[in-house]
Amino acid sequence: MNSKSHRLEIIIPLSTILSDSIFIVLSFYLSFEIRFSTSLQNIFPVDKGYPPFEGYFYFALLTLPVWILTFHANKMYRLNRSVFIFDEFFIIVKSVIISIIFSIGILFFFRDFPYSRLVFILISATSIILITIGRYFLLKFEKTLYNKQIGVKRVAVLGTNEMADKIYTKFSKDKFTGFDVVGYFAKEKIENGNKLYLGNYESIPNIIKSKKIEKILISISSSEHDDLFTLFKYCEGINVEFMLAPDFIDIMTSKLKITEVDGIPFMKLKSQPLNVWNNILKRTFDIVLSVLFLVIFSPLILFLSIIIKTTSKGPLFYKQERVGLDGEKFMMLKFRSMKTDAEKSGPQFASKDDDRVTTIGKFLRKYSLDEIPQFLNVIKGDMSIVGPRPEREFFINQMKHSVKKYLERHRVRCGVTGWAQVNGLRGSSTSMQTRIDYDIYYIENWSLIFDIKIIVKTLKEMFFSKEAF
């Protein structure tokens, strides 16, 4: 194992434990000060006198192991390698709530000290904020080390399909993932740009030792999965980690469930993506958030409306028929970002440096501001905030025969943003099949937290995406 990588696997988790510990104790102090030294006491009067902080400080030290063990149980002290702090925010919330519950339970053994319940409510909020901030900076520090090639793991890619190509390209470019891609293995060498061919399956054991490879990232089709047994046999007794990037068939198979009806077992091959209650939850979330968004950003909407009308001739909104849930058609709204005769030659995808785009349209499209009117479609019920992006029937008829499972995306409401878009899969240069696979993953793994995560990542993508145009 790379010695620097090994040291980092010790340093980063220990640093995270230290950071969490400091901020947990600090949250006790801040919560105590907010409760007893601010105007909050005017709203919630102090009836039992002002206790000394020492009681809270010693209690924080006493219960600190409970917090650390709870975080550890939720697997929060591994090397992160996450590219986005929001990925673990809800785990922090869950861990804090559990820790607070255990801490309150311990209070029964300390009834002589006048602990305030309001302080513990404040501790819940302040600890979540402080721990998240601490972990954010540690994550940035960790990624900085990886960008400088400190502590990275040497990895190889096995496979030559589209996903294998994406893994090789992405991890070679994004050093902050902590991987140093040294090349790829395949049954035989293929013309693959500047990618380094390491050898066939039989050569893997020797290459692992000579190149000091620590992980092999595997992406092969389902029909080749029998090769994995051969690979494992070749690598018996060798300390190397295998990680498999599943294709769509693997993801679909993992969703298989056995249901028993009147003593007869059935294998559920396909189920409804959202049950009744989840549908109600998602729809309520969509309406509330859309209304809040339109109200809060109404000045921006008015400003953009004036600019669009004064800088180019034509209507303010561009209406276009799209296909949504269950194949139903609806008129999708956008701020007009192209000339009025943009599609006089027929439907066509937008491209980078498209001469049909207006001057203000370039700005709107770069930051996805032309999509704002779609929140009206959300309120109406034609769309959801998060879901597969809606498409025109003209292109659907072209792609439903060439793109596997393309029509599966119509099983849920289409969205203003989606899982594919926040992963950079937008524009004419990205694979439509890969986009659909991401859409189907979202459909099969929906949760409200997943929606919130996509919305937050969308805000980041709006300002930093290189694919936006």
Image (cartoon, grey):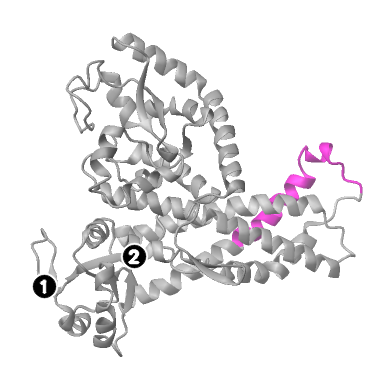
Where residue 69 appears, as percent x and y from the top left, is 62, 71
Q: Residues within 10 Å of mark 2 (few under 14, many from 20)?
A: some
Q: Quadrant of residue 310?
A: top left
Q: Main secondary structure of the magenta part?
A: helix
Q: Which residues are magenta?
A: 22-47
Residue 84 appears in the figure: no
Cα distance in 3D space between marks 1 and 2: 21 Å
Residue found 91% across the figure and 47% down from its top = 47
Quarter holding the N terminus is: bottom left
Vertical position of residue 186 compared to residue 290: above or below: below
Q: Is residue 376 left or right of residue 355?
A: right
Instruction: Write down the residue under mark 1.
Output: 188
Task: Describe the element under mark 2 as helix, strand or loop.
Answer: loop
In the image, what residue type sits under mark 1?
Glu
In the image, what residue type sits under mark 2?
Pro
Residue found 61% across the figure and 55% down from its top = 93
Sequence order check: which comes first, mark 1 or mark 2? 1
Task: For the residues labelled 1 and 2, say whether their Cβ atoms are less than 8 Å apart.
Answer: no
Nearer the observer, 337 or 27: 337
Residue 123 appears in the figure: yes
In the image, residue 32 lies in the stretch drawn in magenta: yes
Q: Quadrant of residue 238?
A: bottom left
Nearer the observer, 119 or 228: 228
Quarter holding the C terminus is: top left
Q: Is residue 75 left or right of residue 2?
A: right
Where residue 205 appears, as percent x and y from the top left, is 21, 84
Which residue in the rendered view is the most extreme toward the bottom?
Answer: 237
In the image, residue 117 lies in the stretch drawn in magenta: no
Residue found 39% across the figure and 62% down from its top = 251
Task: Describe the element under mark 1 as helix, strand or loop.
Answer: loop
Instruction: Write down the residue under mark 2.
Output: 246
